[in-house]
């Protein structure tokens, strides 16, 4: 299998426990994300990578319901979870997204996949390193080769790198052929990933607006929706500021 989309998901969360089970448009966050991806990608291209804990059985049951593949691995060593998942499904290159980004843009995923192939890269991202990204939080996509992931698994020694999977790539760019794809407009002050309960309120409102306006939901369209509503704008910007302040404590 080449270029599977591996979604990192678990029910345990430091800041907002069971956030992926919260409801958006009568579906939980994870199912909402899966349905969004299925508009562009086939079921056999999507894999859920979760933990071995009993509390995450609900994620596996959802995978079965949606008829997509899933994998169970280490909770805190997420790098190993991805590596073992990629091994099982014989993935040559991997697209990584996280379950707290339900408004991810499938068209952007496909655009980045083409850039990755064309430039013969080891690693491509649109929101890493965070200090240089012009994309809003919530549109986070990373693509990397399996053999490069295998290499960093041997070089990553601290727990933070193992938890965040790809830190080693952008901390050591000379070791790999890396590239960052950036947005033309700087939308980095905005955030629509789900880390706090207020984020869920924001994402629900965005989802309603996208549905009503029959929009695809690109990063630009979503930020445009946020900017037009004072309340939504405050939630988004404050959440981004809070997120950056506490970033070192986060485990996706």
Image (cartoon, rainbow, N blue to C red):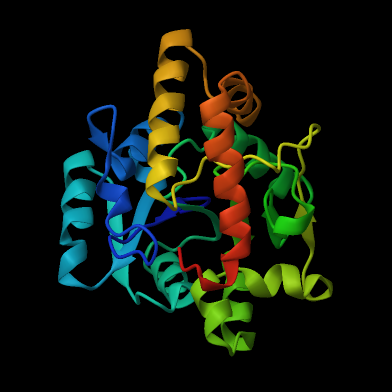
* Image coordinates for residue 24, horizontal then vertical, percent: 31, 33
- Image quadrant holding the N terminus, namely bottom left
**Which one is nearer the viewer's eye here, 128 or 147?**
128
Q: Is 127 situated left or right of 132 in this image? A: left
The quarter holding residue 17 reads bottom left
Between 211 and 95, the residue placed more toward the observer is: 211
Q: Residue at x 44, y 53 (%)?
A: 195
In the rendered image, the residue lying farthest to the bottom is 157
Q: Residue furthest right?
A: 174
Q: Position of residue 46 (x, y in %)?
A: 39, 46
The residue nearer to you, when weighing 228 against 87, is 228
When the figure is inspected, residue 124 is found, relative to residue 172, above or below; the finding is above
Name the residue: 21% across, 63% down. 56
Which quadrant: the C terminus? bottom left
- The residue at the point 64 percent across, 41 percent down is 136
- Vertical placement of residue 164 versus 241, above or below: below
């Amino acid at each position: 299998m080449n270029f599977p989309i591996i979604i990192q998901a678990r029910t345990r969360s430091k800041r907002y426990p069971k956030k992926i089970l919260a409801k958006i448009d009568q579906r939980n966050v994870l199912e909402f994300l899966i349905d969004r991806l299925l508009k562009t990608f086939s079921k056999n291209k999507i894999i859920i990578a979760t933990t071995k804990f009993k509390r995450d059985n609900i994620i596996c049951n959802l995978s079965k319901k949606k008829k997509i593949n899933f994998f169970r691995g280490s909770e805190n060593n997420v790098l190993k979870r991805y590596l073992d998942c990629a091994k099982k499904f014989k993935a040559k290159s991997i697209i990584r997204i996280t379950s707290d980004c339900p408004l991810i843009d499938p068209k952007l995923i496909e655009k980045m996949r083409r850039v990755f192939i064309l430039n013969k890269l080891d690693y491509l991202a649109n929101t890493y390193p965070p200090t240089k990204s012009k994309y809003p939080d919530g549109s986070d996509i990373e693509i990397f080769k399996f053999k490069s992931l295998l290499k960093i698994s041997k070089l990553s020694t601290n727990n933070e790198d193992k938890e965040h999977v790809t830190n080693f790539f952008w901390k050591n760019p000379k070791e790999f052929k890396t590239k960052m794809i950036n947005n033309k407009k700087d939308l980095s002050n905005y955030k629509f990933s789900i880390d706090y309960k207020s984020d869920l309120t924001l994402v629900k409102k965005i989802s309603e607006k996208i549905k009503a306006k029959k929009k695809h939901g690109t990063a630009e369209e979503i930020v445009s929706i946020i900017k037009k509503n004072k309340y939504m704008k405050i939630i988004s910007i404050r959440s981004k500021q809070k997120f950056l302040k506490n970033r070192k404590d986060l485990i996706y």
